[in-house]
Image (cartoon, helix red, strand yellow):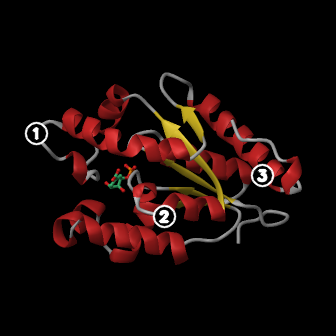
């Protein structure tokens, strides 16, 4: 258990590849004095191999199963920041599962920014194709409605990292405060 005074709801960062979930998540966890978990990294540790190898050897469905297992039993249930792989939340029922376990915030960036940020990373097998921009568009079209349901979406394009970190912390704290109010007194999240 990380060194906090009392356990607090987890923060789950979701959103497309290359939106900064790991970088922002690690920084937010440090500031909140929470544990930090990166679903890809935890799966790689558990399986002893890379995400790309898991996709190649066992297929995407197996990887998605590992993501579900990570959410069900692979991380602390409180006082943690969790950076979720881009496809984790797209699976049936996963968004509701995350929302029941903590605060969910979606990070967003334009596809141009995402292409630029992901071009040198080998751990995104879904983009190992001749035309990664076409693949990004196709995935984005399918996923966007689900990411939007996460409620709070924070833009990360052309903003200093420190701004994004403060924004995420502000929203997280507000959501936690809302959760501690009696149901009738809660505001809708914006
Ligand atoms: C994926 C995103 C990746 C990783 C895997 C699949 C996706 O994580 O889980 O390559 O389906 O969007 P990041 O979002 O951290 O890049």
Is 72 above or below relative to 7?
below
Q: Quadrant of the N terminus?
A: bottom right
Asked whether, in this view, residue 186 is left or right of residue 23, the answer is: right
Q: Which of 187 and 49 is in front in this view?
A: 187
Q: Which numbered tag is attached to residue 130? A: 1
Do the residues under discs 3 and 1 have CB atoms within 8 angstroms?
no
Residue, disc 2: 93
Q: Which of 156 and 89 is in front in this view?
A: 89
Residue, disc 3: 176
Asked whether, in this view, residue 165 is left or right of residue 13, the answer is: right
Count residues near mark 3 (Cα–Cα under 10 Å), then give few for <14, some for 14-19, many for 20+.
Answer: some
Q: Which numbered tag is attached to residue 39? A: none
Q: Quadrant of the C terminus?
A: top right
Going 48% across and 45% down the picture, which residue do you hit? 147
Q: Is residue 23 visible?
A: no
Tell me the CA gap for discs 1 and 2. Answer: 32 Å
Quarter of the view holding residue 119? top left
């Amino acid at each position: 258990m990380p060194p906090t005074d009392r356990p607090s709801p987890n923060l789950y960062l979701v959103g497309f590849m290359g939106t900064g979930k790991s970088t922002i998540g690690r920084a937010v966890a440090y500031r909140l004095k929470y544990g930090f978990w990166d679903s890809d990294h935890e799966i790689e540790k558990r399986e002893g191999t890379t995400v790309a190898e898991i996709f190649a050897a066992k297929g995407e469905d197996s990887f998605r199963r590992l993501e579900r297992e990570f959410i069900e039993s692979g991380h602390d249930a409180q006082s943690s920041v969790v950076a979720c792989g881009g496809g984790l939340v797209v699976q049936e029922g996963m968004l509701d599962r995350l929302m029941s376990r903590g605060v969910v915030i979606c990070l967003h960036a334009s596809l141009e920014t995402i292409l630029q940020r992901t071009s040198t990373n080998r751990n995104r097998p879904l983009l190992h194709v001749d035309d990664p921009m076409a693949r990004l568009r196709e995935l984005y079209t399918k996923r966007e409605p689900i990411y939007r349901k996460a409620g709070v979406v924070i833009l990360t394009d052309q903003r200093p990292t420190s701004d994004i970190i403060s924004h995420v912390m502000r929203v997280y704290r507000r959501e936690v405060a809302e959760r501690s109010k009696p149901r009738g007194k809660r505001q809708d999240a914006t």
